[in-house]
Image (cartoon, grey):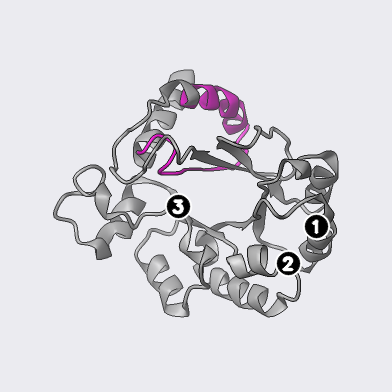
Amino acid sequence: MGWSYGFWKGNFYPADLPSKDFLGFYAKQLGTVEVDSTFYHIPRTQTMTDWKNQTPNNFLFSLKFPQKITHIKLLKKCQEETRVFLERASLLQEQLGVLLLQFPPMFRQQHLPLLAKYLPTLPKGYRYAVEVRNKSLLNEELYALLRAHNVAVVWVDAAKMPLVEQFTADFLYVRWVGDRKAVTGTTGKTEVDRTADIETWAKRLQPLLKKQVPVFGYFSKYYSGSPTGDVAEFLRQIHLLG
């Protein structure tokens, strides 16, 4: 996820490519990106305008909700932060993909009523997804809540979380997170061979793609060490499946 990696130069990016041109190059090779920086702070208006201007109209940005909303305030008394974040996100217009609510392990079953109260306050017309990192929340109560609001539960391939295969929206959001203990993610090269795992995922998702279900999928640098290589392998496997 993301594109601002200097260590991709010479691997994915040309060795002499200035960092200011990373996004434009990335957008010519791939169709979407998950933006991690919005988790740490709400981007400036000019930043959103720059992202839009540097990419083609069919390139999509998926943005993480700010951690102040999901981690610090745990959805309580965050109306202003939510308003400003959505206002900035809307500047991407047709290039806005999915808005991701990513919750910490401390967000547990007892916090579910907060999510039930928060989701109805979000404006319609956007795609929303929810990722939980506490196993206690992976139950039908959560899935039913998300279905009621057409919010996708995130399918995560990670070391400490079980695989979720529930459909709660009219699109799918997949995050290949990997294992930080096994992969440094700072070389821009494959550190762990995930070919077999990607083949399994291609077989799992190919029927949905054939039905033209929108699938947003993002590889972390901690999955194999080479997110762009993982994308290429996934697309290769999909092509082989026909």
Pair 2/3: label in front = 2
Q: Amino acid at mark 2?
A: Leu
Query: What's the residue at 43%, 48% (across, down)?
Result: 31
201 on left or right of 150:
left
Q: Is residue 80 magenta?
A: no
- Tags 2 and 1 touching, CB below 8 Å: yes
Tell me the SS state at disc 2.
loop
Residue 47 position by quadrant: bottom left
Q: Which residue is mark 3?
A: 33
Residue 242 seen: no
Query: What's the residue at 69%, 32% (across, down)?
Result: 165
Q: Nearer the viewer, residue 70 or 82?
A: 70
Q: Amino acid at mark 1?
A: His
Q: State the image coordinates of residue 67 (x, y, percent, origin top left).
A: 59, 65
Tell me the SS state at disc 1.
helix
Q: Which residues are magenta?
A: 198-225
Give the class, few, some or many, for how many residues have Cα within 10 Å of label 3's Cα (few <14, many ≥20).
Answer: many
162 on left or right of 189:
right
Q: Amino acid at mark 3?
A: Val
- The disc label shown at residue 111, or none: 1
